[in-house]
Amino acid sequence: KVVMVQDEPRHHQVLHQGAVRILDVQIPPGEVALFHTHDTAILYVPISISPTDTQILGQDWLGVKPTDRSRFEGLVVASDTWYARMPLTHRVKNVGDRLFRLIAITNGSAGSVRQNGAPPGTPVLSSPWYSAAKLAVASHGSSEWQAASMPTVIVLPGGGRAQIEREAGSGQTALDQAGAWAFVAAGQRYRIRNLDEAAASVVVVQVNQ
């Protein structure tokens, strides 16, 4: 059975807004995802990493072992934008001993080479489809107000507690555990507040369209 990536049971779709989808990918140890097709650019924010083996449809497993290094180890974000030009169908198996979890953001548009303004923080990735940065917010501090020039996703990859505030009564979103996320529509102004004693780091992803 082959499904689209957003329909694969372990790639839980948690938001669909225009060309943007957010998937909470969770594969427990020993489990295998269904064959699924990627046909859009995708960006991953690692939350819990474990070695995974991959099988492209019609081919053998790559043969990744539990002792091998995960491709996501040590990365703030990773991205496969070539899916937008060359769709791929594969399945993934968690061969490690811990949960494999990513927050994945797909971009169904053709991307944009325009300079749309970078998200706040230290840049970690830039492509026609995405601009991503890591932003540290001091204890009980807050970022400056930001204007989202493009749809923006903010992810808490590790510990801490943060809150996303939107201007003009558009609501707040609590980021109170690893893997929590918030979506900010293009044109909205937002800021990030740290509700904890220790500094908190978030990943800010701008989805270029």
Image (spheres, grey):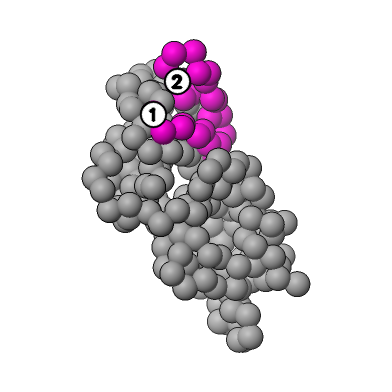
Q: Nearer the viewer, residue 207 or 180?
A: 207
Point out the image quarter for the N terminus.
bottom right
Q: Residue furthest top?
A: 169
The residue at 51%/46% (across/down) is 20
Which residue position holds label 1?
187
Which residue position holds label 2?
166
**Range drawn in magenta:** 163-187
The residue at 38%/38% (across/down) is 150
| Residue 54 location, quadrant | bottom right
Q: Nearer the viewer, residue 136 or 169?
A: 169
Q: Position of residue 99 (x, y in %)?
A: 63, 55
Q: Is residue 52 above or below residue 73?
A: below
Q: Nearer the viewer, residue 121 or 18?
A: 18
Secondary structure of residue under mark 1: loop
Query: Which one is in front in this view, the residue at disc 1 or the one at disc 2?
Result: 1
Task: Kindly identify the amino acid type of the residue bearing the numbered disc 2.
Answer: Arg
The residue at 69%/65% (across/down) is 3
Q: Give the mark nearer the N terminus: 1 vs 2.
A: 2
Residue 127 visible in the current orientation: yes
Residue 65 visible in the current orientation: no
| Residue 79 location, quadrant | bottom left
The residue at 50%/60% (across/down) is 40
